Image: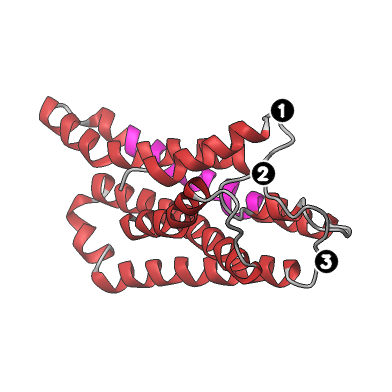
Amino acid sequence: LATVDIAYACNTVPQMLVNLLSPAQPISFAGCMTQTFLFLTFALTECLLVVVMSYDRYVAICLPLRYSAIMNWRVCVTLAVTSWISAVLLSLVHLVLLLPLPFCGPQKLNHYLCELLAVLKLVCADTHLNKVMVSAGALSVLLGPVPAIVISYSHILRTVLKIQSAEGHQKAFSTCSSHLCVVGLFYGTAMIMLYPNMGTPGRRRNTSSCFTVFSTPC
């Protein structure tokens, strides 16, 4: 997860600094498409890794004696690689649908990066299919894992309530606190970014996406 957070910054900060220092300096079409693809990949990977981490916390607290056997290195590597591959494939789908579309007009993004929804506003054609895919991806990858996270923490809470010692409560809290912070920050800002029709101004969406890039804890 820390690697994904670093990649977020490396993908967005250099071009953002260029825009701040030289506002008239444009970004190339290839560079914009690359940034869009990488941003989607990192966002989807983080979403999937958050679910994996919730399962890890569940095993650590609810099944501590079997943790080493269940979450061995092979399982961890498999889960991480699966998350990355799934994110890359889903991002490729969006990129393949985006590349053939014609771009016209001022070609000026109302965003500090080439975010997919912002890029789609520059298209001079019907983008209904693209927006449907964005909504479908958000429902499946962003909201789909929520029940798994809720179920994991329901079991964790039930286990913690059975612990009698204050030291046990403190250990359980320290195990889950960082992950809960990631879940709150990531899902809160992602919902604002991906659902622009929920009464959220574009400037606020830009601020929320910037907040996600710079403040998500590792």
Q: For marks 2 and 1, give the CA distance.
A: 17 Å
Amino acid at the residue labelled 2: Asn
Q: Front-most of 117 and 85?
A: 117
Number of marks drawn? 3
Q: Front-most of 106 and 53?
A: 106
Amino acid at the residue labelled 3: Pro
Q: Front-most of 24 and 180?
A: 24
Q: Which mark is residue 199?
A: 1
189 up-or-down from 35: above or below = above
Q: For marks 2 and 3, give the CA distance.
A: 18 Å
199 up-or-down from 82: above or below = above
Q: What residue is shown with label 3? A: 102
Evaluate if marks 1 and 3 touch, with contact meaning CB atoms under 8 Å apart. Answer: no
Secondary structure of residue under mark 2: loop
- What residue is rendered at 38% in x and 67% in y? 80
- Image position of 138 (left or right of 15): right
